[in-house]
Image (cartoon, grey):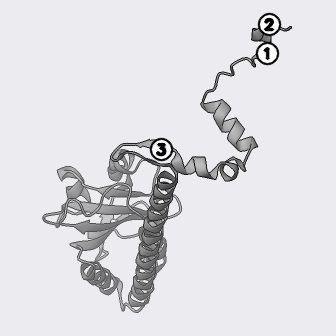
């Protein structure tokens, strides 16, 4: 007669991986054991414990809520993008109808203020445009070499900067502006060699790092062609 120990199957140590492997290899487990599954309870941080079915339903409700939130955000972003695109088309037509450079700059300024901003300004690198005396637009000029330290510190390798500026930086780009809380800077030109487009807000939190720059990018690409109607490139 065999020893009793030989007749008893060795105890199999179960861990999370073993249970998971078994369930994956036996997808009909919960169907075969439906009644037992209904009696299972799992720990719950609020209720103490809950049935497996309730727990699964809770997870599904949470996932659905997350999906609904993501869809809502996507729809809101799509609506914002559509609105910005419409404003962009409107601005392009408005600027193209300008009778002169000052008229175009005034139109750009009015458009920015219709968005609730403090203003919009253009500064052109004197090394790239013929705007020295006796031009009427010498006030638009800024030396690229004078701007270089700001470019390195604020923009780095990117064409845009959104945030605040210190006193000397504001004096360089917006010497006449008052109560500037935050700005959006966009370099113009393929290599950022033509100048800077500047939108300013009195609100220090209006422009912040990480915000979208699609509209800024399109404006920075559009303006040089319009400027060339009245200013000659070097």
Please tell me whether residue 132 is drawn above or below residue 17 in the rendered image.
below
Mark closer to the observer (1, 3): 1
Q: Who's the residue at 46% across and 68% down the image?
A: 68
Is tag 1's residue or tag 3's residue first in the polypeptide sequence?
A: 1
SS class, disc 3 = strand
Residue nearer the viewer, 222 or 111? 111
SS class, disc 2 = loop
Q: CA distance from mark 2 to mark 1?
A: 7 Å
Category of crowding for the residue at label 2, using alpha-carbon neighbours closer than 10 angstroms: few (below 14), some (14–19), many (at least 20)? few
Category of crowding for the residue at label 1, using alpha-carbon neighbours closer than 10 angstroms: few (below 14), some (14–19), many (at least 20)? few
Q: Is residue 201 left or right of residue 79?
A: left
Q: How far across and down, in percent of the image, does residue 30 sit?
A: 65, 50
Mark closer to the observer (3, 2): 2
Marks 3 and 2 in Cβ contact (< 8 Å): no
Which residue carries the number 2 mark?
3
Marks 2 and 1 in Cβ contact (< 8 Å): yes
Which residue carries the number 3 mark?
41
Please tell me whether residue 155 is drawn above or below residue 48 in the rendered image.
below
Residue nearer the viewer, 229 or 114? 114
Please tell me whether residue 192 is drawn above or below residue 166 in the rendered image.
below
Q: Who's the residue at 53% across and 62% down the image?
A: 190
Please tell me whether residue 95 is drawn above or below residue 153 in the rendered image.
below
Q: Is residue 189 left or right of residue 124?
A: right
SS class, disc 1 = helix
Is tag 3's residue or tag 2's residue first in the polypeptide sequence?
A: 2
* Residue, far right: 1
Q: How far across and down, in percent of the image, does residue 127 sit?
A: 42, 60
The quarter holding residue 21 reads top right
Q: Who's the residue at 22% across and 63% down the image?
A: 174
Residue 7, numbered label:
1
Q: CA distance from mark 3 to mark 2?
A: 39 Å
């Amino acid at each position: 007669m065999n020893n009793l120990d030989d007749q008893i199957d060795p105890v199999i140590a179960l861990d999370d991986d073993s249970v998971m492997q078994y369930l994956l290899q036996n997808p009909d487990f919960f169907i075969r054991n439906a009644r037992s599954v209904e009696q299972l309870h799992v720990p719950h941080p609020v209720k103490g414990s809950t049935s497996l079915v309730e727990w699964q339903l809770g997870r599904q409700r949470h996932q659905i809520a997350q999906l609904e939130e993501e869809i809502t955000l996507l729809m809101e972003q799509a609506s914002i993008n559509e609105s910005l695109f419409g404003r962009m088309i409107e601005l392009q037509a408005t600027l193209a109808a300008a009778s002169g450079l000052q008229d175009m700059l005034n139109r750009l300024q009015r458009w920015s203020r219709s968005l609730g901003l403090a203003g919009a300004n253009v500064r052109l690198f004197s090394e790239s445009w013929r705007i020295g005396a006796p031009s009427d637009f010498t006030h638009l000029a800024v030396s690229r070499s004078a701007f270089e330290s700001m470019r390195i510190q604020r923009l780095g390798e990117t064409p845009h900067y959104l945030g605040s500026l210190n006193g000397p930086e504001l004096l360089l780009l917006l010497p006449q502006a008052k109560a500037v809380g935050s700005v959006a800077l966009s370099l113009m030109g393929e290599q950022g060699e033509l100048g800077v487009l500047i939108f300013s807000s009195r609100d220090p939190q209006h422009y912040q790092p990480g915000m979208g720059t699609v509209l800024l990018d399109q404006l920075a690409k559009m303006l040089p062609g319009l400027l060339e109607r009245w200013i000659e490139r070097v």
